[in-house]
Amino acid sequence: MEAFFKEAVVPHFNFWIYVIIMMIGLWSVIAKNNLIKKLIGLSIFQTAILLLYVSLGVKEGASIPIIDHHAAERSLVGDAGAINPDLIANPVPHVLMLTAIVVGVATLGVALALCQMIYKDFGTLEEDEVLQKIKALHDDV
Amino acid sequence: MIVTFDIIILVFLVIAAIISLSVKDLLAAAMVFGIYGFLICLLWAEMGAVDVAFTEATVGAGVSTVLIIATILNTRRRSTD
């Protein structure tokens, strides 16, 4: 048990928490009744996926992906050892996730606008009450 | 990456996620969701993704909390679960 903890849990703690947060988000989307609660859960689900991708770019002992000015000049002249890639975190997943954050907030805004329209039409944000009112509407017709 | 800092923030992250989904007051849920966004912003900065941290602090913790609060103002604050 202790060996499992040392070999599997602590070095990959980000990935364990990624799974836990993702399942919390999935549970809320399925089980919660309030529509705004569902949207908060969806945002939490999204940040879990961002956590997975940013964790892939992490290196042990690496710093932020900004190159020292002098090192950049030296590498342009032909000094191959001027920039050490082991000391720089991989910036490619960061850039991809930057786009995902912005798109996520845009979709959250649209979803919250739809919630306001649902509230205007049905007077409630609880999923079961909305479904009941839709069913009553169909029974009248 | 600093492992102790990482583990502390990740544990608080799970706690904030559970609290924001289990409180019945939606305004409190929105505020705890803002705390969640700020914690994950700290996590990005700690993992070396400073650009993602800036965006998360403004957009994730700021704008999405404001959007949720605006929706609560136009609708109802109580939630059944």
Image (tube, grey):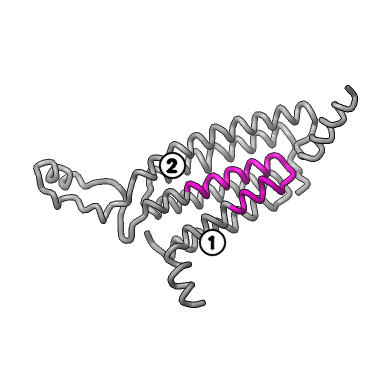
Residue type beneath disc 1: Val
**Is residue B64 rendered magenta in the image?**
no
Q: Relative to A13, say whether A137 is above or below.
A: above
Segment tinted magenta in the rendering: A23-50
Tell me the subunit letter for badge 1: B
Q: Secondary structure at mark 2?
A: helix
**Same-chain check, marks 2 and 1:** no
Q: Secondary structure at mark 1?
A: helix
Would residue A77 be found to the left or right of residue B63 on screen?
A: left
Instruction: From the top left corner, tell me how far across and down residue A84 is, in percent.
Output: 21, 53
Residue in view at x 30 percent, y 47 percent: A65
Instruction: From the top left corner, tell me how far across and down residue B60 is, in percent.
Output: 52, 41
Q: In the drawing, what numbered circle is on residue B11?
A: 1
Instruction: From the top left corner, tell me how far across and down residue A10 is, in percent.
Output: 45, 67
**Is residue A42 rendered magenta in the image?**
yes
Residue in view at x 27 percent, y 46 percent: A66
Q: Relative to B46, say whether A7 is above or below.
A: below
Residue type beneath disc 2: Met
Mark 1 is surrounded, within 10 Å at the Cα level, by few (under 14), some (14 to 19) or many (20 or more) other residues, namely few
Q: In this view, which residue lies farthest toward the right? A: A140
Q: Relative to B9, say whether A69 is above or below.
A: above
Magenta highlight: main SS: helix
Would residue B34 be found to the left or right of residue B52 on screen?
A: right
Q: In the drawing, what numbered circle is on residue A97?
A: 2
Instruction: From the top left corner, tell me how far across and down residue A133 is, in percent.
Output: 84, 32
Depth check, front residue: B35 or A109: A109
Would residue B45 be found to the left or right of residue A39 on screen?
A: left
Quarter occupied by the C terminus of chain A: top right
Depth check, front residue: A86 or B5: A86
